[in-house]
Image (cartoon, coloured by chain):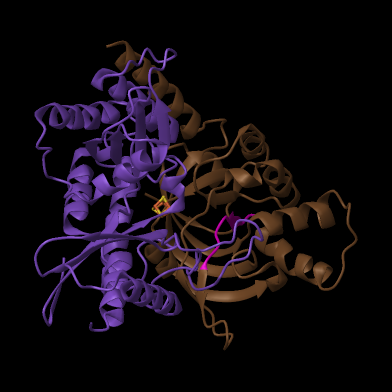
Amino acid sequence: MHKLTIPLSDEVVRELKVGDAVALSGTIVTGRDAAHKWMIETFIKKTREPRGDDLQVYQTLKPLLQGGAIYHCGPVVAGLDTGEYRFVAAGPTTSIREEPYQGDVMRHFKLKAVIGKGGMGAKTLAACQEVPAVYLHAIGGAATLIARSVQRVVGVYKMDFGVPEAMWVIEVQDFPAVVTMDSHGGSLHAEVEAASRAALEALLAS
Amino acid sequence: MRDLTDAFLELVRRAATDLPPDVEQALREAREQEEPGSAARSALDTILENVRLARENSTPICQDTGTPLFYVHHPEGWSTRALREQIRAAVAEATRRTYLRPNAVDSITGKNTGDNLGDEAFPTIHFEEVEGDELIVDLMLKGGGCENVGAQASLPDTRLGAGRDLEGVRKVVLEAVFKAQGKGCAPGVLGVAVGGDRGSSFLGSKEVLLRPLQDSNPNPALDELEQRLTQQANQLGIGPMGFGGKTTVLGTKIKGMHRLPASYFVSISYMCWAYRRRRMVVRGDEIAYS
Ligand code: SF4
């Protein structure tokens, strides 16, 4: 078990290998489809003018994301009426939807970890090697346990995206995950698929 | 007829927050099988810890609380219309209490109803009149990730060399498990229906998942195939969450159905490790849950 604390250094990231179990602590930010599209269009490709609180949010999130982690998660949150937010259930959502954006977001913010489920593709794997960074696979369905690792909701931005899509800044303690894509070009998803394909062929022929 | 809304609410709460003992037992056994220090074992540790916490805190095991599928077996004289209303009221209340996530999305407008009440198939409620004086209600919560990796094959399939026999069934089921990889939140349980038309076949593949996990099939040929499929699916090495490992499926349940001479469907429903199903039995004034 590797204990990781944000911000992550290049050395720590390079030590991590596919298959390593980790417990992550520190401040992380949630972001899914709307957040990734917004970051790319407004600040990276700049095809859209910043408006409203865009620049302010960018300035606030930038230092958190540098050396930090983004979590693909649409949480169930209590306390929406009082503003005393609490995460009730917060398992990972499928990551592959962010494949078109993720690599550029990682390079722009110097993101060291992307957390989700199901793994990502070649563009993200290339970014993991360059930045360097890792993909951390959270345990699908472990919603109550992961919500418990969230010690505090520090803040929420872009609430106009809706609760599941908003960018929640949270403090986590020992968030459990497994490295399934590392900074050396390793992808557990590619490995397991290839090995299981060979096993399937043998079983079909038997 | 008495109002069972509160009883249904309790059934939903138990299903969403308390994993059945047979499933938890299978997950524990799976954990013992995996290598100490492996990603597979650590995934199962996390899963088991999550199951414990959800039970203690009465919070959802998984944030995707799925499609609620009710199977109602009622004696003569019960009003199915009243039962339907009570079930729907209980589902809406369970959503308010965050036992369920609002999951009913209008496919045409994209709007979420916010209370899990959609059209007549959401929640899904099957009624069947039975002998005796007990009302028996089974509830299964079937999440989206695993539902998305379900499959239906029409035999023969020349690509796989799968003919219209149990050997052909074996091949298409193994291919479905391979295609699912870890995406249905493995280790899963396979519900397989052989025969039927496309619709009844898929329904059969879900109903068969109501069987206890450790039982055996009364049909010796199907029993043998169930064991063989579980064993061979595990030889694929996909493992918990697709991390690689010895446990890809916890069990296989197969049901034979009648078919047209022209058709031979094999339907596979993949149930994720969060195999949430609970039963309620009403007899006179007594209500028991299992
Ligand atoms: S497949 Fe099952 S465990 Fe996984 S996210 Fe969906 S409901 Fe939860």
Q: Is residue A73 magenta?
A: yes
Q: Is residue B181 visible?
A: no
Residue B251 is drawn in which quadrant?
top left
Rendered residue at 14%/32% (across/down): B223
- On screen, residue B27 versus residue A30, left or right, reads left
Rendering coords of residue B8 (x, y %):
29, 74
The outermost residue toward the bottom is A82
Rendered residue at 28%/26% (across/down): B235
Q: Which chain, by letter, is purple?
A: B
Q: Is residue B276 visible?
A: yes
Q: Quadrant of the C terminus of chain A?
A: top left
Name the residue nearer the viewer: B45 or B92: B92
Q: Colour of chain A?
A: brown
Rendering coords of residue B288 (x, y %):
14, 73
Rendered residue at 21%/52% (across/down): B23
Rendered residue at 10%/70% (across/down): B133
Rendering coords of residue B105 (x, y %):
56, 61
Q: Is residue B77 above or below residue A80?
A: above
Name the residue nearer the viewer: B111 or B134: B134
- On screen, residue B50 versus residue B184, left or right, reads left
Q: Is residue A55 above or below residue A127?
A: below
Q: Is residue A31 above or below residue B172?
A: below
- On screen, residue B37 versus residue A16, left or right, reads left
Q: Is residue A98 above or below residue A58?
A: above
Magenta part of the chain: A66-75
Residue A126 is drawn in which quadrant?
top right
